[in-house]
Amino acid sequence: MRMTPQRQLVLDALVELEHATPEQVYQQVQTRTPTVNITTIYRTLELLESLGIVRHTHLGHGAPNYSVHEHGHVHLVCHNCHNVIEAPCEVMDELRGTLRARYGFELDASHLALSGICRNCTGGNS
């Protein structure tokens, strides 16, 4: 695959934004090249993901979030304030072992978002 200017724009936008929906990538690209349309963004993200350059994670009911960096974390998404906390994948080690032992299932925790209520919304201190 050759790196077209449009592909480079999408990749540059993801590097700058770190985590972004296709719409956010589109808005970022539009600041540089208004002629690129949203369909090009979706197709480019799909291609870059198939090549292993980007990954996506669903952080709730909305559009997926894309990132160019290898995910070394699990996303914890608050139902109330929609804050996203990044926890190290190691927090899933016990569950990973249980799933492997009981079901022969290998968990990819780097592609995972968990929903709940954050500390700020529960009023907890721990």
Image (spheres, rainbow, N blue to C red):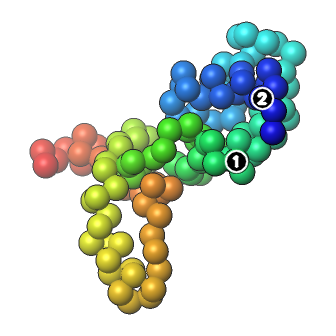
Residue 62 seen from this side = no
Residue 84 seen from this side = yes
Badge 1 density bin: few <14, some 14–19, many ≥20, Cα 10 Å? few
- Image quadrant holding the N terminus, namely top right
Q: Residue at x 63, y 22 (%)?
A: 12
- Foreground: 83 or 105? 105
Q: Secondary structure at mark 1?
A: loop
From the image, tell me which residue sits under label 1.
51
Q: Is residue 93 left or right of residue 126?
A: right
> How much space separates mark 2 and mark 1, taking CA atoms?
12 Å
Looking at marks 2 and 1 on the same chain, the residue that comes earlier in the sequence is marked by 2
Q: Is residue 68 left or right of residue 79?
A: right
Q: Is residue 14 left or right of residue 23?
A: left
Q: Residue at x 53, y 34 (%)?
A: 19
Residue reaching furthest to the top: 32
Q: Which mark is residue 7?
A: none
From the image, tell me which residue sits under label 2.
3
- Foreground: 75 or 93? 93
Identify the amino acid type marked 1: Leu
Tag 2 near tag 1, CB within 8 Å: no
The image position of residue 6, as x and y in percent, is 80, 24
